[in-house]
Amino acid sequence: MFSSLLKSLLLATAVSFFSGCQNTDLSSAGTPLKKAEAEARNGNWENAEKLYLESLKASEKNASTTDATRKKLARFYYDYAISMGTQADKAQNPESYTKALALLKKAEEQDPKLAIRCASAQERFEKELKAMQYRAATSLATLDPNAKGREDKIAVLKKQGQTLSAAGSYDDAIKKFEEILRLDPYNQDAARELKKIHGKSLEIAKERSAATRAEAMAETEWRKVAPIQRKDEEPGSQPSAGTKAPMPEENPFNSQLFEEISFKDAPLAEAMLKLEKDYKNRVPEAPVSIQFQGMNPADPKWPAITFATKKISLKETLDSICAGLGLKYELRGQLIVISPK
């Protein structure tokens, strides 16, 4: 009986001993792990890594605990790598990309199931790192020891060029951006600004050219018109611009005077319609109808009409306008037909 009691006592002591050892392992592993997770959440990556490694070492006596800790450590390394990559992009720091790539490798070693995620991040980081290294190797500062002063000058020229462009001084702005390209032939900002300016200049040039051409054409044609001889000032004088045979004085088309005729940048069709209505109001017993033949009065090739005078007949008005535009007209009873010469 004493022997049975001794065996029971020894067995209880052994169970208590091993249980105590196991609980010690778990508690020693759990405490650093919780601290590590808290440090990682706060962005204290280096402290978190130390605590994770400490936790992993403490869990080595228990296989299931070790596996769980490795997975958490792998996830920690992956998150750490992503954070470093983000910092590298913002700060344009190649060393941070290098460290991020090393962390991705550690993450994959701890948990192979993260291989796909790690490979995707690795590809992106390597691409960004190469681009950053290329920009550094080909930058103006690398190629030219005097680049700092030149970069400052380029910044000033860029600001001046943009200000001039916004004010519409395109020629002066072009000079500023071309000077930038002489300092830095690969400056993309200057190239883009020049492209924008040339696009604006082309549109403006087309508008100015069309307006100038129309104005010059109208001015040239109007100069060909002889001064109008007003009947009220010179009784018995003949009309200035001849078209067809002179009309008898008693014909209201030739004798009835408008008090005032005034057009300002009026399209041809609009001007003729106004003449037709005004004449009808003055001579309701013999209204006329103005039509066009062999031409489109709305065609932009016909310049707008600017014309103002007093005491003038419908015939004299048509003589002047048609002569100025290179047109002719024919009176067919009460119908006036206007056509190109």
Image (cartoon, rainbow, N blue to C red):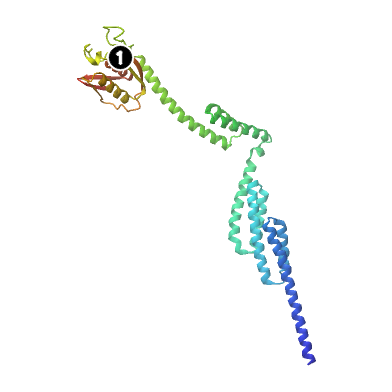
- Asked which quadrant contains residue 328, the reply is top left
Q: Is residue 112 above or below residue 279?
A: below
Q: Is residue 259 left or right of residue 170?
A: left
Q: Mark 1 — residue?
A: 312
Identified at 78% across, 89% down, the residue is 5
Q: Is residue 340 left or right of residue 123?
A: left
Extreme residue in the left direction = 333
Q: Is residue 317 above or below residue 119?
A: above
Q: Is residue 98 above or below residue 33?
A: above
Q: Nearer the viewer, residue 156 or 182?
A: 156
Q: Position of residue 309 (x, y in %)?
A: 34, 15
State which quarter of the image contains the C terminus: top left
Q: How many marks?
A: 1
Extreme residue in the bottom direction = 1
Identified at 45% across, 30% down, the residue is 203
Identified at 70% across, 72% down, the residue is 62
